[in-house]
Image: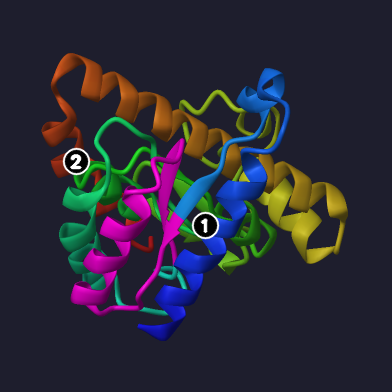
Amino acid sequence: ARSAERTTRWLQRCKAQWQTGDPRHSHQRQLFGINQGGVYEDIRIEHMQQIAALDLPGYAVGGLAVGEPTEQMYAVLDAVVPHMPDNKPRYLMGVGTPGNIIEGVARGIDMFDCVMPARNARHGHLQTWQGRFNLHNEKYKDDQAPIEQGCNCPTCRHFSRAYLRHLLKSGELLGLRLCVMHNLYFYNRLMTLIRQSLDDGSFQDFRARHAVTLDRRI
């Protein structure tokens, strides 16, 4: 609770300084209030109500990507999101897996950031629409298929799993780069399809098909 109070005082100081800037450039500098409070729903809600009163351009939920179980993260979101302004962007910090993103959207989250697609790729963990697999596994040594059939990313259009695995095993930086390109392409495609499903009213079907499948290990 004391930490949340300190965060609010700091945010008040940030807002005062932010407002001293040239208003002609205000669109270039957006100040978000960050909700904190650990996994204590009462502290989270009180803190969200306090920072919402500051009328900022957007709001974030922080501190939910540091080891808490997924179920606990969803419970905090269920408690906090109803208290976030519904006319401002809502940002979930440091999240996450494709399933986390889909479930975050289902709870009203608009924005995400995470090192996961790039970090996982550098370790050979590649995301597909059937789940995630480890390219270091021996069974991919002579696999001439792309990371995922039908994927239109530059990596899948030009390189096989076997070649990418060879690059990773050889310590070639090109392997890291190509794997990162695929995972980033996948995440961008995921967000595009989520937006489309929200627009056409099919998001709940999309959620049912993919939220669990995308997070499984192949």
Q: In 3D space, how far apart are the residues under numbered discs 2 and 1 (Cα atoms)?
A: 38 Å
> Most extreme residue toward the top, as rendered?
200
Identify which amino acid the numbered label 1 is placed on: Gln
Q: Residue at (16%, 58%) from the top-left corner?
A: 78
Rendering quarter of residue 76: bottom left
Task: Reply yes or no: does residue 111 show up in magenta.
Answer: no
Q: Is residue 59 magenta?
A: yes
**Helix, strand, or loop for circle 2?**
helix
Q: For the C terminus, which image quadrant?
A: bottom left
Q: Eyeballing the image, is 83 above or below 150?
A: below
In the visual, does 16 lie left or right of 171?
left
What span is colored magenta in the figure?
A: 34-62
Q: Amino acid at mark 2?
A: Arg
Q: Which residue is mark 2?
A: 207
Examine the image and state in which quarter residue 201 appears. Answer: top left
Q: Which x, y percent locates residue 150?
A: 46, 26
Q: Nearer the viewer, residue 25 or 176?
A: 25
- Give the label, 2 or 1, closer to the camera: 1
Residue 60 location, x and y as percent? 42, 52
Left or right placement of residue 201 versus residue 111 in this view = left
The disc at residue 103 is: none
Residue at the image point whose x is 27% and y is 40% from the top: 85
Q: Which mark is residue 12?
A: 1
Q: Secondary structure at mark 1?
A: helix
Nearest to N terminus: mark 2 or mark 1: 1
Tell me what residue is drawn at x 69 percent, y 18 percent. Answer: 24
- Mark 1 Cα-neighbour bin, 10 Å: few <14, some 14–19, many ≥20: some
Nearer to the camera, 3 or 181 = 3
Front one among 59 and 176:
59
